[in-house]
Image (cartoon, rainbow, N blue to C red):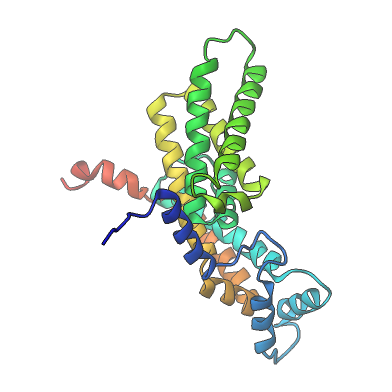
Amino acid sequence: MNSQKPSFGEIVATGSAQQETQEIDLTVPKADGDRLTTLLETQQVKGWWVVNSLKLAIRKAVADGVSPNTLVLLFLFPLVAALVAFSRQVVGVNGFGMIVPALLSIAFVSTGGMVGLVLLSFVMTSAVFGRMAIKKARIPYLPKLAVLIWLISIAVLGLLIMSPMIGLERLMNVGIFPIMIFVLLAETFIETQITRSVSTSLGMTMETIILAFIAYKLMSSTWIQNQILLQPEISAILILVLDLLIGKYKGLRLSEVWRFRKLLSK
């Protein structure tokens, strides 16, 4: 009996298919919005209208045609920002600021985790080899960066064209938005290489990707999406309180505790 091992493309496709059954692409306004709309219809809003003002406003907006996906994403983005702030202020993660990991997490939501990692890895690899190819070109920085983006775009174009042939059909449905976010990360990575060491830029890039992937898993949680949509007033207040609590933290970061653990134990 012949048994064939699944190809890498089949593994990615299988993982993506499993994710599609569990996750909603919140970046597409009407994609699978019926589930969230039905969820709103199952909840009866009772009590004083001032206390339930956000619930009523959300239902009015959805009835007027606003996508519930967009509304949930607007609540999730501040939650991701709070996660990034916590990682910087309390944990001590040295990523690429606030916006890059937040946008990268949304790009993962758009592509799916496995497909996003494959595409991001390809973009980053193309950026590294592209920079090596044009490193000795005697042109100013901005034109050189434009050439690098051209090389990355051509490489991604080739990948999308070849994706059906190598078993990565899921890549054909990827929009331009996540690709541009991945290119933004590659540009930031290259700039960090120029101003700092290669090891520092690699470390910051990996921390940013890991943080963005954690945020992506958080945003993809059906339970969190449901709670935010059904309890918007409580969600908004909790996120604000979380931000204030993070701002009040003045102790050592967890990375510093680990770094100086020998001194602290004496």
Residue 198: horizontal and vertical position, in percent?
A: 41, 25
Residue at 54 percent of width and 63 percent of height? 219
Extreme top residue here? Answer: 138
230 displayed left or right of 129? right
Say which quarter of the image contains residue 197: top left
Extreme left residue here? Answer: 266
- Nearest the viewer among 68 and 229 is 68
Say which quarter of the image contains residue 260: top left
Name the quadrant of the C terminus: top left
Residue at 27 percent of width and 41 percent of height? 259
Residue at 29 percent of width and 47 percent of height? 257
Name the quadrant of the N terminus: bottom left
In the rendered image, the vertical position of residue 135 relative to residue 81, given as above or below: above
- Nearest the viewer among 80 and 242 is 80
Residue 86 visible in the shown view: no
Number of numbered markers: 0
Residue 80: horizontal and vertical position, in percent?
A: 55, 57
In the rendered image, the vertical position of residue 245 relative to residue 64, given as above or below: above
Residue 49: horizontal and vertical position, in percent?
A: 76, 86
Residue at 66 percent of width and 20 percent of height? 142
Say which quarter of the image contains residue 243: bottom right
- Nearest the viewer among 82 and 208 is 208
Residue 210: horizontal and vertical position, in percent?
A: 43, 49
Extreme front residue here? Answer: 1
Residue 229 visible in the shown view: yes
- Nearest the viewer among 30 and 43 is 30
